Image (cartoon, rainbow, N blue to C red):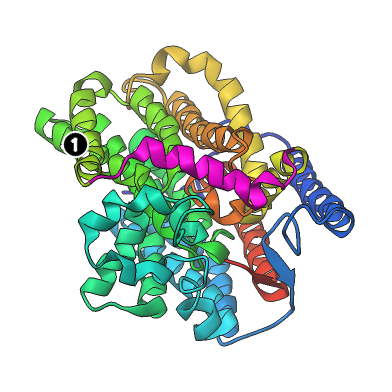
Amino acid sequence: MIRSPLLSPPPLPSPPPRRDLAAASAAALLVLAAVLIGRHIERTDHTLFADWPPLWASWGPHVGPGTPAALTVALLTVGYGPVLAARLPWRALLGAAWATAMAWTWSLALVDGWHRGVAVRLTTRYEYLQVIDRFHDIPAALGDFTHHILLGSPDHWPPHVAGHPPAATLTFVLLDRIGLRGGGWAGAWCITVGATACVAVLVTVRRLADEDLARRAAPFLALAPAAVWMGTSADGYFAAVAAWTVAVCALAVTATTRRRAGTAAFGSGLLFGLTCYLSYGLTLVAVIGAGVLLLGRNRLRVLPFLAAGAAVAPVAFTLAGFDWWEAYRLLVERYHQGAGGIRPYGYWVWANLACTVLITGLATAAGLGRAGSALVEGRRTLPALWRYGSRGRGAGAREQVAATRLALLVLGGLLALLAADLSGMSKAETERIWLPFAMWLLPACAFLPRPRVWLAAQAVLALLLNHLLLTGW
């Protein structure tokens, strides 16, 4: 019988609720400061290139066809999500989480209507579908790819094509080749695949920490404010591929047989290689993956298979004529040719974190505080931390170990995000760019008591953002 997380004691000594409110309040103040200071900078210096900093958005209260559906999904998830997450069989829970994330993302996207919300998002002058006709000969296009990155080059690529390795563009080229043409199909692909990211995170949490914690996190992953952007850019698709890279790695390091471990590790390596050719910045997924390896029992056994799988995409693209390192060097140069070279690092290095608050919600800020407490408390269980399952220990000790392991997983996501921030290559637009890292902060909500209250706060934030702002992505 599955023990209900709602009826079981918390996995660690519970900090006072006022600490949760303090963490959430601090996060809200960070957002307020980013808005006020950002608007002042943009009015006076015009260097942020954002109408409603720290987001790439403009003020525009509106409702749309997706509004009733979004409200319905929010109410049902807040009302029944925690209970169902506790009681459903595990596989049914995964299906329900994906379905909820799909419904939430679609309904939020359709607040802007089918045309603006889905069909044209990936067809603008910045986007991938602008260059479909230039990939009739895929090997030739790959071999010539780096010659069109810089702004001064002939027929330079649109910003998102130039800003990503070619696997991103090739995804939409291949969709076009099989008959799924146009922005509608591209948007549907990103939403459908992107919604699986929450499933990948749940699989990882269950494998590396504890099923109860995964169940507690499920409603927060399905109803994340990040869905506002998961459904409006290709970064939702990238986030899912990155999440499955980590999830399959977790399956590898916890597998019970050598064959399963090797197969899963090779698959994780394949996905990691693909991830690196979807977005340069997603090489930082390796930080999260390193944490998974440390928390698993097969870490040394799976490394050769991981490396072999990870080599496949680089070898294939290199043989096709695409030089990843040269392309990244040229991208850095182009980044500084455009708005990236003008936007002030001193503002965005902290305002980007305000963007993270908006995509993960105030509940995540409170959850991160509790994750920090779990790490502090976990020092007492360090000898057992690396022994998967902690067999033979009391229930309280097992829960403490599971909480510490989850906190370490969340810490990996936070470290990857901070590395991206400090790099200076993520000045603005991180509400979409950092989706692959933000997904790994959301499981911290599993530590929170009174989940319905925090879920309601998450839903209200997402609904306000989507109905008061016209997001650029």
Quarter residue 17 falls in: top right
User: At 49% across and 69% down in the image, what residue appears?
Assistant: 105
Q: Main secondary structure of the magenta part?
A: helix
User: At 22% across and 72% down in the image, what residue appears?
Assistant: 177
Report x, y in % for residue 426: 60, 44
Residue 91, above or below 402? below
Quarter residue 199 falls in: bottom left
Report x, y in % for residue 46: 81, 56
From this viewpoint, which residue is outermost toward the bottom?
A: 65
Q: Is residue 200 visible?
A: no
Report x, y in % for residue 56: 67, 61
What quarter of the picture does the C terminus occupy?
Answer: bottom right
Q: How many marks?
A: 1
Q: Which residue is mark 1?
A: 266
Residue at disc 1, secondary structure? helix
In front of the other: 446 or 247: 247
Residue 83, above or below 349? below
**Left or right: 310 with respect to 343?**
left
Q: Is residue 205 visible?
A: yes
In front of the other: 194 or 169: 169
Magenta part of the chain: 321-345
- Let me know if residue 348 is in the magenta part: no
Residue 116, above or below 391? below
Report x, y in % for residue 133: 32, 72
**Left or right: 339 with respect to 82?**
right
- Let me know if residue 333 is in the magenta part: yes
Q: Residues within 10 Å of mark 1 (few under 14, many from 20)?
A: many
Circle 1: residue type: Phe
